[in-house]
Image: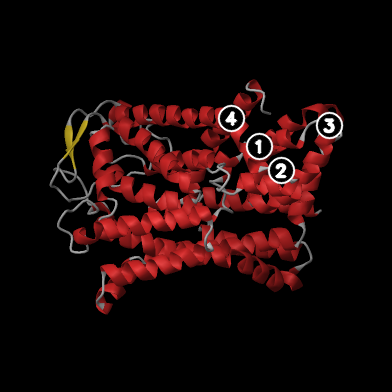
């Protein structure tokens, strides 16, 4: 019964947000509450929610102060050279823009933190997508997949969890998987190239009006250049300026600040403090990788120091905090709402029942191929549950079944990493709300677009791992 209720709850949630019948926050709160009552455990709903909130509170705190920190870094101009460098590479070519998005997300992902990756990537690329009128779900989808592949670095989380759960060395898991993961990353770059060509065909040849700060009309196309919005027949539009030419509508009230991200005269710039801010950011990321302090504490200290040094006057500090309050509230609110979902899943025992049923459905004849089975199961399981739930709850059971048929724990651990490109777009991953929130993309649009491509990337990694003999 719990298994059926668990799958029904997840399916109901996904259908409602993808069809836009409910907002993600409302669905994350109301749907699990209803199913908790249906499971006959409504009296314990409060305990489940408190447990969920307690578990995600450090993540919410980290996101709040991380948004403030990187928001201040954007205000002071730390990432302006990065954006200008990408602009020079992209040359207003949609294909290069999408490939540049994938490359930037992959490089920044080396810090091991998805939220940081998405904040930097969206901050750098959003103005360009807006000015060119490109599909924003292409940006969020490509960034999420690139980060998902790179999330397997030993300090990123999944590899460390797999190593801990099976009592293995993280390097023994990760290093042999590098060739397969590189194939997956190349797959993401190849997909970015194809999606970029679609955007190029939809938009035609473009050029950016260098000094214009007007906005273009926002277009979010889940079809990623399938022809909508390209005019009759989806043909080429020819060369045209981007950034407020004749006949273009304004892009909305809340996008102006982001579209002025490259304005060399904005009053928030602090060019004399550029190297201080660069050193502070580098130190912060290094401290995160080395785990010198908990990440929420690092961002709290970093945000306080960045505000104090760059904006010594109290009114200026208040103004910067207020400027980023919208993002802070949206993201932290989503995280606490997700805590209700995860709290009910775990507290009622739905997640354990679902995992056990999936493991039990594996035919006996597949025993010698448990690594392959684990790789395939990692797609839905890491999408529908947290990494902690999968690696500490399900993987040991799968590994035990594999050991009975001669499959080594190392093979099982490597196979368990396959689902990460899809996992990074799971509604249970707080970082994805940073991504869609900063990009002004509906979570349902992002989900409809990314799931098929992320699943394909996962299967590509799994196939490469088998061919290379690491799985």
Task: Determine if residue 86 is in view.
Answer: yes
Residue displayed at 54% across by 46% down: 424
> Toward the viewer: 41 or 287?
287
Q: Which residue is mark 4?
A: 461
Earlier-in-chain disc, 4 versus 1: 1
Q: Helix, strand or loop at disc 4?
A: helix
The outermost residue toward the bottom is 314
Q: Categorize mark 3 by other alpha carbons within 10 Å: few (<14), some (14-19), many (20+).
A: few
The quarter of the picture where residue 190 lies is top left
Earlier-in-chain disc, 3 versus 4: 3
- In the picture, the disc for residue 172 is 1
Image colouring: secondary structure
Residue 146 percent coordinates (x, y): 47, 39
Earlier-in-chain disc, 2 versus 3: 2
Q: Helix, strand or loop at disc 1?
A: helix
Q: Nearer the viewer, mark 4 or mark 1?
A: 1
Residue displayed at 68% across by 34% down: 375
Q: Which residue is mark 3?
A: 363
Mark 1 and mark 3: span between their CA atoms? 29 Å
Q: Quadrant of the C terminus?
A: top right
Earlier-in-chain disc, 1 versus 3: 1
Residue displayed at 16% across by 54% down: 264
Q: Which residue is mark 2?
A: 168
Residue 251 percent coordinates (x, y): 26, 51
Residue 202 percent coordinates (x, y): 31, 30
Vertical side of 460 occupied by 338: above or below:
below
Q: Is residue 44 left or right of residue 452?
A: right
Q: Helix, strand or loop at disc 3?
A: loop
Q: Categorize mark 4 by other alpha carbons within 10 Å: few (<14), some (14-19), many (20+).
A: many
- Is there CB contact under 8 Å for labels 2 and 4? no
Residue 12 percent coordinates (x, y): 63, 52
Mark 2 and mark 3: span between their CA atoms? 27 Å
């Amino acid at each position: 019964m719990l298994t059926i209720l668990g799958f029904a709850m997840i399916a109901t949630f996904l259908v409602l947000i993808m069809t836009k019948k409910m907002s993600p926050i409302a669905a994350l709160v109301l749907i699990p509450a209803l199913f908790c009552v249906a499971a006959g455990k409504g009296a314990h709903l409060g305990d489940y929610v408190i447990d969920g909130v307690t578990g995600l509170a450090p993540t919410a705190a980290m996101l709040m102060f991380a948004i403030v920190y990187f928001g201040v870094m954007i205000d002071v101009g730390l990432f302006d050279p990065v954006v200008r460098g990408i602009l020079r590479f992209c040359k207003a070519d949609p294909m290069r823009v999408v490939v540049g998005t994938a490359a930037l997300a992959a490089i920044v992902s080396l810090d091991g933190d998805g939220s940081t990756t998405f904040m930097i990537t969206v901050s750098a690329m959003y103005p360009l997508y807006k000015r060119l009128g490109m599909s924003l779900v292409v940006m969020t989808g490509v960034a999420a997949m690139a980060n998902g592949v790179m999330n397997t670095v030993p300090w990123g989380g999944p590899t460390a969890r797999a190593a801990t759960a099976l009592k293995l060395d993280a390097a023994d898991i990760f290093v042999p998987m590098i060739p397969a993961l590189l194939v997956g990353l190349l797959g993401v770059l190849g997909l970015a190239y194809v999606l970029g060509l679609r955007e190029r065909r939809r938009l035609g040849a473009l050029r950016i009006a260098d000094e214009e700060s007007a906005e273009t009309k926002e277009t979010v196309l889940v079809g990623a250049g399938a022809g909508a919005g390209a005019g009759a027949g989806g043909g080429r539009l020819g060369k045209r300026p981007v950034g407020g030419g004749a006949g273009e509508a304004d892009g909305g009230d809340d996008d102006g600040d982001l579209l002025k991200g490259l304005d060399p005269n904005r009053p928030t710039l602090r060019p004399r403090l550029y190297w201080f801010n660069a050193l502070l950011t580098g130190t912060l990321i290094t401290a995160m990788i080395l785990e010198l302090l908990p990440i929420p504490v690092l961002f709290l200290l970093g945000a306080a120091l960045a505000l104090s040094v760059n904006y010594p006057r109290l009114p200026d500090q208040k103004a910067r905090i207020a400027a980023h309050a919208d993002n802070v509230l949206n993201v932290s609110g989503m995280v606490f709402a997700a805590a209700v979902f995860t709290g009910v899943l775990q507290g009622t025992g739905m997640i354990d029942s679902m995992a056990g049923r999936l493991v039990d459905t594996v035919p006996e004849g597949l025993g010698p191929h448990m690594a392959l089975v684990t790789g395939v199961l990692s797609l839905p399981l890491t999408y529908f549950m947290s990494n902690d739930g999968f690696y500490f709850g399900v993987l040991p059971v799968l590994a035990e079944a594999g050991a009975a048929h001669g499959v080594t724990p190392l093979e099982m651990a490597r196979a368990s990493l396959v689902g990460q490109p899809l996992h990074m777009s799971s509604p249970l991953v707080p970082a994805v709300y940073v991504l869609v929130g900063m990009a002004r993309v509906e979570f349902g649009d992002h989900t409809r677009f990314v799931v098929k491509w992320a699943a394909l990337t996962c299967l590509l990694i799994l196939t490469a791992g088998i061919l290379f003999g690491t799985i």
